[in-house]
Image (cartoon, rainbow, N blue to C red):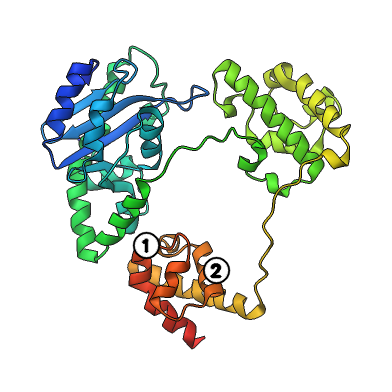
Amino acid sequence: MNCSSQINYQIIKTTSDLEDVAQALSKENMVAVDLEADSMYHFKEKVCLVQMAAKGINVIIDPLEVKDLSSLKPLFKDKNIKKIFHGSDYDIRSLHRDFNIEVNNLFDTQLASMFLGIKATGLDAVLKTRFNVDIDKKYQKKDWSQRPLPKKMLEYAARDVGFLIPLTEILEGELEKKGRFSWIIEECGLLTKVRHKTNNSEPLYLNFKGAGLLDPRSLAVLEAFLKFRLKIAQKKDKPLYKILENKPLIQIALEKPGDENQLKKMRILGKKQIEMYGAKLIEIIKNELEKSSHDLPVYPRKAPSVPGHLDHIKIKALKSWRSKRAQQLGIDPGILLNNTILNKIIVLNPENQKDFFQIENMKKWQINTFGNEIIKFLKKL
């Protein structure tokens, strides 16, 4: 089966049609959901389509036409109706950001696939494996804010969500068989609480990867660059990376070229970018170089906890235990227990299962399944 086969769907463009759809979906016990957004094309991203499917129902809701999606709120909040997403983190944040919609009773098919040890968990790969369906992902990065949307894009959007219910039925059975169903339910419950956070609060470098490695002078230059980029992106209504990407910005902040010729010799910005922004970047560098050292920012750091020699040995041993157990279970070691939690376990040195609940972000399923095993292992060291 491939993408060219026909799929029946309805486009929802009026409030009354949306109310009818919400009423019909509220009678179902499972509803599949997907979103399309325009984050690659605008400074302030927004949801451009909401696709929903149930047995005999496949709709594409256009929130650029239907401004008020409040009739969907009871459906998403209803704990008796399972909402199925594939890779839900971004979607949960976006639904709350744009429509103040909260989701209860979530099932994430990508997360479920990961907990079953499936390596390729993109929807196209999962559907190919499970149903021999080919999804052409070329539409994934298209501008979903354009109107009218081409028929092929609408068909892609409808097809993307159409297989999630049968996929869920398969995955749930496999999770139950492996004794991991409660794991995924807890993880999905935590996912429903994620919320959108803006990265535009100052200082901007706190949300910039690699900024913590810079000296104060370079950090001041970087912060000024980031403020300049933000201003231009807002003015042009473009994503930040389409103005200036992160990698050249941090490199220029480190090297601090004195003029545009030196900037050109770095060969990290295109000709057009240098024409548009080169002079301003050089001006920023000169301004920041003139600042007193007392006025320079200092990256905030937590006091380092230096593990003793014995702790290093324990961490290494616990990582070895994790690798063996993950291999036995056929899942990624990072899903079993991430490195941060491993380090916290060594510091805590738990003596019973209750002790583990002091560790932030350690899940109940991890404690219940592996807690006693870890305690016994640590006692042997």
Residue lying at 43% horizontally and 40% vertically, measured from the top left: 195
Along the viewing direction, whichever of 244 and 101 lies nearer the viewer: 101
Where disc 1 sits, the SS reads: loop
Q: Is residue 262 visible?
A: yes
Residue 343, numbered circle: 2
91 sits to left or right of 77: right
Q: Is residue 10 visible?
A: no
145 sits to left or right of 290: left
Where disc 2 sits, the SS reads: helix
* Looking at the image, residue 331 lies above or below residue 145: below
* Among the 4 quarters of the image, the one containing residue 88: top left
Q: Amino acid at mark 2?
A: Asn
Q: Residues within 10 Å of mark 2 (few under 14, many from 20)?
A: some
* Looking at the image, residue 318 lies above or below residue 32: below
Q: Position of residue 151 (x, y in %)?
A: 27, 17
Q: Which residue is mark 1?
A: 331
Residue 105, numbered circle: none
Q: Amino acid at mark 1?
A: Ile
Residue lying at 38% horizontally and 70% vertically, measured from the top left: 367
Q: Position of residue 285 (x, y in %)?
A: 81, 30
